[in-house]
Image: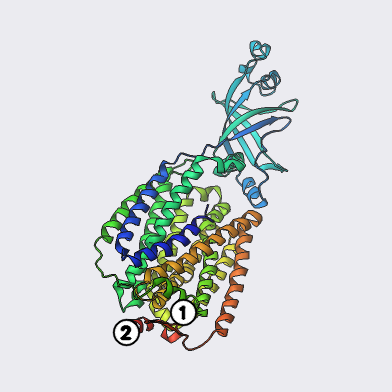
Amino acid sequence: MYSVLPILRMVSKPLFGFVADRFRLQKTLFLVFQTIVMMCFFFIQFIPEIPKTTHISLDCDALTYIKKCNGGPVDDNMFGKLKAEGAITCQTVCVVDNAQFMGEMCAQWRTPQFCDPVIHLDPNTSLDVNFQSFLLMEHSVQVKNCLFFRVNKVVFDDSTEHTPYCSNLTSIPCTVHCSSMLVNDIIADAALGSSMLALPQFWALLVVLSVSMIAIASVTSVGDAICFSILGDKRNRYGYQRMWGAVGWGLMAIIAGLLVDAVSGLQVEKNYSPIFYMSAIFLLFDMLASGQLKYSQPAPSGSIVHDVKKLLIEPRIIVLLVWCVCVGLSSGFIRQFLFWHLEDLSSEVDQRWMKTLEGLLVGVQCFGGELPFFFLSGYILKKLGHVHAMSLVLLGYGIRFLLYASLSNPWWFLPVEMLQGITYGIFYSTMVSYASVVAPRGAETTVQGLVTAVHEGVGMSLGNLLGGVLYESYGGGQAFFIYSIMSIAIFFVHVFAQIYLKSPNLKVTENDYTAHYAAPKDAISIGQEMEEIH
């Protein structure tokens, strides 16, 4: 799903960017797509839950196990997490449909309610037996495609405890719902198997997310173009504007995490309803604020397609786009798998506060990382230039992934998120400011859409796909280590490529605009120079 969605962003950003530039509809599309985002996000909560089957068998012998076989084996990392769950309880409902098992329950379990001779004489009799199973997860066993969870004791509705022992191996079908979210996920997900694509809920979610993804992509690219248009010759102040997005993102993530945990209480499954109403309310405020924007959209200077096409033959622009793809590989992996990795590392205590931790994580990313670096982005770019800023982003990802691979306590991930300032704050400011500098007059939205589309549609899509394969094959720690090696290798390749292409200024002149690639000292001042050229 998250390999396909970025491709939609890749197509929609330049497409609607072109429409906004060609027909001068930036503000109209900005408001329309915000409305679509609000509606899509709010209605996600009404998609029915995917039916989860939790059918298992209760194998009763000298030792009794809950057995789950369909769905394939779990990896070593996940199996280690299962065994570390300790003692858990499972609400168990079994269909007792054979006299042998009824006899075992009567004689060995010492449950007199199953000693009625009438029950044993009628071969068509079946009983639904409801009890609590107490599992000792450290005794769990995996044999090929089957998982065995050791049952230590059972407790019936009358609060009587029994040892589940049978003189001969006997099995009955059951369904369970356990106090461990991890065990429930393993049992339920294994039951879905390859039938996921046949479920209408999957396709309903994919359609809603696809529409919202197209709308979000258009909002961000058009919004950046509007921002640079309002800033005029003060393009270096873009970071001051963008940091307020980090404030909203971080603040709401912290509040949302706390709300979800508070509303969910001790429930095994989290209640996410607060975030749907929060998103609707704040997106409505967003639309009201956007409607008050006043600015003048410049008219195209010539053929937008022709101007952008000439821009794309610039060697340094090609390097810029490749850099956007490489950064997208890394950012896509973090977005989709960092929280997953955290939950794999968490203990049962951590799980109760997991959404709060994840909210705090985003809060540190924003307030400790993005906000200060967006604020300082103009100064940093003026000192470093776009070239060195690009290299810094790649190195930052390499260090960040290496730390993810090394840590085992999820709470220690909080200080690591300070690196978000380099890997996202500096990256995003570099990407959009340079796109604004090189864009032909009247094609600002088209170029903004192009660079971000390459980053998200190609880079993040590949990152999601590759990350999924690596995570499935090696687990979170090894996957992040592999990404660390990749990022550092790409960093050195980028440095050598820039040395090869090094020149004080590389220019291609066509019609009435000049595309510049800034040396370090000129990275920001070019914005004012471009205004003079226009």
Q: Three-letter amino acid code at disc 2?
A: Glu
The residue sitting at 48% across, 89% down in the picture is 504
Residue 198 location, x and y as percent? 56, 40
Residue 278 location, x and y as percent? 35, 50
Colour scheme used in the picture?
A: rainbow
Q: Residue 532: which disc? A: 2
User: Which residue is farthest bottom?
Assistant: 504
Choose between 322 and 284: the one closer to the eye: 322
Q: Three-letter amino acid code at disc 1?
A: His
User: Which residue is farthest right?
Assistant: 168
Choose between 134 and 273: the one closer to the eye: 273
138 w.r.t. 345: above or below:
above
Residue 9 location, x and y as percent? 46, 60
Q: Quadrant of residue 192?
A: top right
282 w.r.t. 438: above or below:
above
Mark 1 Cα-neighbour bin, 10 Å: few <14, some 14–19, many ≥20? many
Circle 1 SS class: helix
Circle 2 SS class: helix
Q: Quadrant of residue 254?
A: bottom left
Disc 1 target residue: 386
